[in-house]
Image (spheres, grey):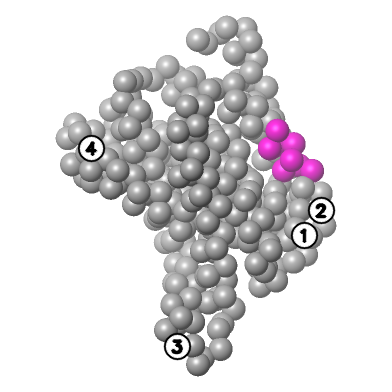
Amino acid sequence: MSVLHAILLGIAQGLTEFLPVSSSGHLQIIPWLADWNDFEGNDDLKKAFDVALHLGTLVGLVTCLRREVWMLIKNGIAAVVDRRTPITDEGRLGWLLILATVPAAVVGVGLRPLIDEIDDEIWLTAVMLGVFGILLWWADRHQGQRSVEAVGIRDVVLLGLAQACSLQPGVSRSGAIITAGRLLYLNREAAARLAMLMSVPVIAGAGLYTFVDIGGWKGIPTDARTAFAWGIAASAVTGFIAVKGLLAVVRTYSLRPFAVYRMLMALLILSLISTNTLS
């Protein structure tokens, strides 16, 4: 695999993982537009590379929100180990986030064959970009003021179901969760922060599953390891920047620009397909 391609895809992954625009969709669309064939005939290696890039963004996220993530883990464990101590807000949220991963895990394992069969359909990715862009626009019009501390079991179950939808490229994990969060009357920062925190157990779990599935580090061809390393590094750095940027943006501005971007991207891809500009 080309190191340059790996770095460019790593940058794309890092910038789009936490923005509500679908990182998996971009990882599919960019090679399609550029006519790259780095993984031709090796779908398993392609999936492993995609997961590796997601792990890179996880590193960027945890680095950026390290104190918050640590408090969730620490207080969540403490709530189980020492039941005499009242559970803290962080401990409660930590376990709620674990609960929110269940729908995505069930869908991911149960529907994996179907997902693998349809996730190469560029037209479907474009449609999902457009449809969920419209939903994001509509949901962001809700004047929600609920904070992260107000989230309960019903909320995280619904947010978890929204996250499960993101297994289809073009939907966007962050976009689906933020959309659902706004419909549940969460404020923009709370919805965005939850989308980021909910990604931690999902990405970590998917990374471990894929690593074991391909046979560990030995499952990655020797000539591809350098590209993997550069891609992970690029996604970690840009993921850190994206987390900082999104949290700053949602405190002041609406999510409309992201919705517009999604719809324009969908129209572009569908128009290219319809005119047979690309095969």
**Can you tell which of label 2 and label 4 is closer to the viewer?**
4
Q: Residue at x 53, y 70 (%)?
A: 95
**Can you tell which of label 4 and label 3 is closer to the viewer?**
3
Pointer 2 residue = 142
Indicate the position of residue 64 as horizontal and vertical percent values. Answer: 46, 61
Badge 2 vs badge 3, beta-carbon distance below 8 Å: no
Name the residue type under label 1: Tyr
Q: Is residue 99 visible?
A: yes
Report if residue 123 lies within the magenta region.
no
Badge 4 vs badge 1, beta-carbon distance below 8 Å: no
Q: CA distance from mark 1 to mark 2?
A: 7 Å
Name the residue type under label 4: Ile
Q: Main secondary structure of the magenta part?
A: helix
Q: Residue at x 34, y 44 (%)?
A: 210
Closer-to-camera residue (96/236): 96
Pointer 3 residue = 82
Pointer 1 residue = 185
Callout 4 crowding tier (Cα within 10 Å): few <14, some 14–19, many ≥20: some
Earlier residue among tags 1 and 2: 2
Span colored in magenta: 131-138
Q: Secondary structure at mark 1?
A: loop
Q: CA distance from mark 4 to mark 1?
A: 44 Å
Q: Is residue 241 visible?
A: no
Q: Residue at x 56, y 89 (%)?
A: 86
Callout 2 crowding tier (Cα within 10 Å): few <14, some 14–19, many ≥20: some
Badge 2 vs badge 4, beta-carbon distance below 8 Å: no
**Can you tell which of label 1 and label 3 is closer to the viewer?**
3
Callout 1 crowding tier (Cα within 10 Å): few <14, some 14–19, many ≥20: some
**Can you tell which of label 2 and label 3 is closer to the viewer?**
3
